[in-house]
Each structure stands twice: as structure tokens, then as C-alpha cells.
Amino acid sequence: MTTARTVVTIAALTLREALRRRVVLALAVLTVVLLGLSGWGFSRLAAESGTSTLTSGEARLTASILLNLVMFGFSLIAALGTAFLAGPTLSGETESGIALAVLARPIRRSAVLLGKWLGLVGFGSGFVVIAGLAQCLVVRATVDYWPPQPTLALALLVAQTIVLLTLALLLSTAISPMASGVVAVGLFGATWIAGVVGAIGGSLGNDAVARVGTVSRMLLPTDGLWRGAMRAFQDPSALLEMGGSEGEAFPFLSAAPLTATYVVWAAVWVAMIWGLAAASFLRKDL
Amino acid sequence: MNLADAAHLLVGLPPAPAVWCSGLRKRYGRQLAVEDVSLEVGRGEVVGLLGPNGAGKTSVIKMLLGLVHPDAGEVMLLGRPAADPAARASVGYLPELFRYQPWLSAAEVLILHVRLAGVGVPAQEQRDCLSLVGLAERAGDRVGGSSKGMQQRLGLAVALVARPEVVVLDEPTSALDPLGRVDVRDIVLALRAQGVAVLLNSHLIGEVERVCDRVVILDRGRVAASGTLAELLGQRELRLQLADLSRAAEARLAATGDVERTGDWFTVALPADDDQTAVPDLVADLVALGARVHAVEPARISLEERLLGILRAGNGGNQ
């Protein structure tokens, strides 16, 4: 009862912090700029294909690639935004002393951590869903393309954001606010690159190189989830259009669909990292 | 004995102390910050925590509040083990490092803390709390734009807002001007009048001397001395410069208390239960017995002198 109240209070406080600190405003501006640019780009694409220089298959391939590219931009913004919010939220508050007065209240630290996490999850997923949906609508309005599984795709983008912010939260219980944001985003980028390297290995038939992508996807599930999201955004014929297995290496198309096992692994991964964050936060001397 | 009897016995017991700790120990790396600290703050009692920088005062306070985990020792707050967060339900705390969410207004910070404390405090009572610390006109201002003094006042309001039974104030006047210090002193005295226990850590010895019932002196992580002010400062004494002292007058002096003599200066310990008549009676009797009284001075060492004495003795003549 009291724990539930604490969780809700802290989650609401975290959301309010994002609003008051103009994080929401900054993200909204970025999103509108990105939507506007992509809208302009897609309308140019429509104008080009109108002169029948592109077959409808080519147009759909291009739309898929561009949509994935823009979505990657959004997932990057969401990742950066939540990682840099999650970092300061714990370590920043312990460093500044804000946590002293709060944690001296009759509340459990795990409830505070859960509240922070839920607030960040609400913030990150809200952003991803709104921006992603707006982007899909822009694409439909300009080139009349609608992704095959938009709900699944957005859900996977949300999952990717949750994975990253949970990692940032764990880091922020142990290291300084700035370092935790930088490390989380750095790992996110590294896994993405490892995923691209692995895909190139796959298309070349080099197992050792392909394994780089697989291992990194297990260690940090952001890239695997991202690839699943791309798969759900892109037109099923796009890969064939790119030339089958050669298309695998292309960073903005995904060859294999996501397995249920992998999604379960991602959930277990988040639970494990959250547990580590809680253990680390509970033991911390303020 | 049946359960009803046991319950009856329990009700008859005096309430558990507001704060109680025993054998607290904390080591940070190689540095032993706190070693075997035990202290107690009774209900409605004001206890001062004194000691030089690095004596472990803030570490002890943080261990009492569950913010720092002790390596050894036990803490009870209002009769409940401090490991249970619910033990802090009626505890107010002003940290030495007072920072509050800069993006909230002062009034919003209080709402947050009331909610976290799980106490229903009406809005009017929260406003009263802000005016008590002199922030009535600043209730809507963002904390981030306030001066340090204003933030410390807000911290005091946060410590007081959830109807505490114990208030822990860690250096509550470090950022306040002289007027603010007087306000804090008045607030502490008002808390004592309401039966709220206060643990006050302050460098301002004069402040501690004015408001505290008891004092605990920490030095290098240990309790160097503790007790009521009268116990710590010793009994009051009287210094007299006398001439033509008869045997009878000497006997009269000795009857008052222990006498020390240096030349024609006599130092007499006054009885602890002195009801303000001992000095005039003694002087009148001495005069009647033919002694010539040149000077009469009350002698009482200040808490500051006593503190310095304890700390120097503890440092084993290094100084």
C-alpha cells in the first residue's frame, strides 16, 4: 500500500522533472524537425516515382529503407534522451544531496527505484509511440506506404528504449551521472555497429564475423530488438528487391524475424539488470 | 501471565526513546569514521551533537536514518528497528547537504514530502509550516532560483511538515544569517515545548548551550563525553576574595561545599540544589562572622571551554 503510493509518487515526479526540465520540449522540437524533413523527403520520392522512373517495388523498397532510417533516428533520440535522463536521476540526486531528504522518509529504496524506472519507461515509450506513429502517418500521407506490423514495430522500439534506460539506471547507481549516460549510449552504438558487422559477416558467409553480431545482441538486446522492429516496419518484398541474402548486410533492412525466445531473453535481461540496479542502490551509502 | 496482563504491563511502560543506538561502527575504506557510538534521545528531549570536523557526527546521523549502512551496531527509532523504513514515519530530517528538487516550487516540495511520509497534512498546515520558517511569500518560487539560506529554511520546513515526533537537524544554521539563527533557536524551543525530540548537530556551541538538555561530544568517531549540561560543565562555583577570616567563618565556608584556597582567594562549590539563596546567605553569614569580603564572583566554565578541554585531553597532549 505505502510502497505502491511511493512508486506512483516517484514515477509522477520523474515525469514532471522531464517536463519541467524542458526535456519534453527539446524532444518535441527535434521530432517535429525530423518529421518535417522526412515528410519533405518522402514527398520528393513520391514526385519522382510519379514520373514512373521507379517501379512500385522499388518505391516500396525505398520507402521501407527511408522509414527504417528515420525510425533509427527516433530510436537514437529516445535512447539518448532516456539514457541522459536516467543517468542524472539517481547518481545526480545522490551527488547533489536531493536523495538525502527523500530517502530519509519512511519509504523503501526499491520502491523509489521502481518509481523512477516506471516514470522513465512511461516517458520513453510515450515519446517512441507518438513520434513513431506520427512518422508512419507522414509516410502514408506522402507515399501511401503503411508498414505491415506497425504495432509490433512500435512495441519493439519501446522495448529497445526500456533495455537501454534500465542499463543507464544500473550504471547510475554505480558511476557518476555524466559517465553513466555516456557509457549507456556508447554501448548502444557499439552493439548497433556489431550488429551491422555481424550482418555483413552473414551475407559473406563468414560465421566468425557473423557471431560478433549474435554475441553482442545477446549481451545487450537493443540491436536485436531494433532489427525486429525494422523487420516489422519494412515491406516483405523489400529484401527480395535488394537481392536476397546480399540485402542482409544493409544496415537499414532486417533479414530474419524476431524469435519469441529472443523477446523472452530481452525481458529476462531487463529483469536481471533491474535486480542488479536495485541491489546496488540498496547497498549504497549516501 | 496471560496476554491481557502482558499488554497492560506494556502500556504501563514508559515510551521507547525517540532515538536509540548502540555500538555503531562505520569504516570508509581505511578510514574508521565511527567507532562504538551509542547514544539516546528521550521523547521530547533536545540533544546536541558536538565535535570537531571529521568527528563522525554526520555519519552517525546518516546511520540513524538508514542513509548509511553501519558495519556494526543497532538503531531504534521511536521503539522500532531502523531497518524497517516505517520506523522513520515520524522522523523529520534536515541534511547538512540540503538540496531539494530545483524544478519544483517550495510548496510542491512540501506536498511531495507529505505524500512520501504518508501523512495527511492539510494545505493550510503546510502553508503554516512555510510561514514558520519565513517562506510564506516564497511558496510559489522555484527552489532552483532560491538563495542557500532560503533553501535551508525550506529544508527546515520539510523536516517539520509531516508532524514529526523526532527531528534531526544537521547543521541547521550553516547558511542562515543571525536572524535566521534566532528563528531556528525559537523553532527548536517550540518543538521541545510540544514534546518533539530534537537531535541537533551544530558547530555553534552557544546555540547548543542555549537549547539543549543534553550534549553528546564526538571526537574521532567515538563518544568523548556525554551528559546534561550541568553534568558536563560541573557544579557551579563561587570565587571569593576574603580577609580577616575567623575559624567560624572558615567553618561556614566549608559547610557550603568543597573549598579551595589560593592566597586570599577561595573557591567554593555550590550545592546542586541551590535555590538562589546560597550565595546571599553565605555572604551575609561571612560578614556577620567578621570576615571582610573584597570580591564575590560566580564561576562557571562555558561549554566551549569544556569542549576544548575534552578534545585536547582526547588528543593526548599532541597540542
Image (spheres, coloured by chain):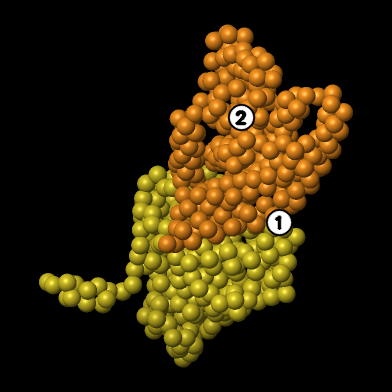
Chain colours: A orange, B yellow
Tag 2: Cα neighbours inside 10 Å, few (<14), some, or many (≥20)? many
Q: Is residue A211 above or below residue A176?
A: above
- The residue tagged with tag 1: helix, strand or loop? helix
Question: Residue type at mark 2?
Answer: Arg
Give the percent coordinates (x, y) of residue B175: 68, 61
Would you say A99 lies left or right of A238 here? left
- Pointer 1 residue: A20
- Pointer 2 residue: A231
Give the chain of mark 1.
Answer: A
- The residue tagged with tag 2: helix, strand or loop? helix
Q: Nearer the viewer, residue B107 or B256?
A: B107
Residue at 64 percent of width and 73 percent of height: B130
Residue at 68 percent of width and 47 percent of height: A130
Residue at 17 percent of width and 72 percent of height: B3
C-alpha separation, residue under disc 1 versus residue under disc 2: 36 Å
Question: Residue type at mark 1?
Answer: Arg
Residue B152: quadrant of the picture: bottom right
Would you say A7 lies left or right of B136 here? left
Residue A158 appears in the figure: no
